[in-house]
Amino acid sequence: MLSSEHVTPHLTRGNPDALRDSLDRALDALDSDELRHGFRSDFGASAVSSETVDRLRGYLGERIAATE
């Protein structure tokens, strides 16, 4: 499992607008029915807890706010 400590430094490089767009798309994907259905089909309904998804949403939201 990756920690935010390992990921965050890599997000601070490059174009902040492009990063924000990518993070926004990632948040949209987390909320998509297609992702949920595909993930359940491939890995099973309980493969990722809702707590993990909520933590990822929070992290992505924090990173988006940091680019503004």
Image: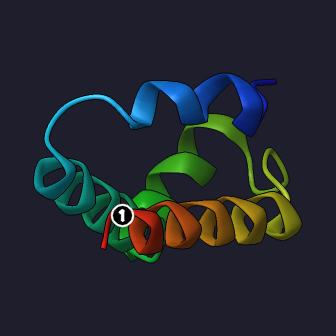
Image vertical order of residue 41 relative to residue 56, above or below: above
Residue 48 located left or right of residue 57: right
Residue 43 located left or right of residue 30: right
Image vertical order of residue 5 relative to residue 17, above or below: above
Q: Quadrant of residue 43?
A: top right
Quarter of the figure that contains the N terminus: top right
Circle 1 residue = 29
Residue 25 located left or right of residue 51: left
Q: Quadrant of residue 32?
A: bottom left
Q: Amino acid at mark 1?
A: Ala
* Residue in the picture at 12% in, 49% down: 18
Disc 1 residue crowd, few under 14, some 14–19, many 20+, Cα 10 Å? few
Q: Position of residue 27 (x, y in %)?
A: 41, 68
* Residue in the picture at 39% in, 36% down: 12
> Which of the pair 31/40 is nearer the observer?
31
Q: Position of residue 54 (x, y in %)?
A: 74, 72
> Which of the pair 13/7 is nearer the observer?
13
Q: Position of residue 9 (x, y in %)?
A: 54, 28
Display colour scheme: rainbow
Quarter of the figure that contains the C terminus: bottom left
Q: Secondary structure at mark 1?
A: helix
* Residue in the picture at 36% in, 58% down: 26
Q: Position of residue 24 (x, y in %)?
A: 29, 68
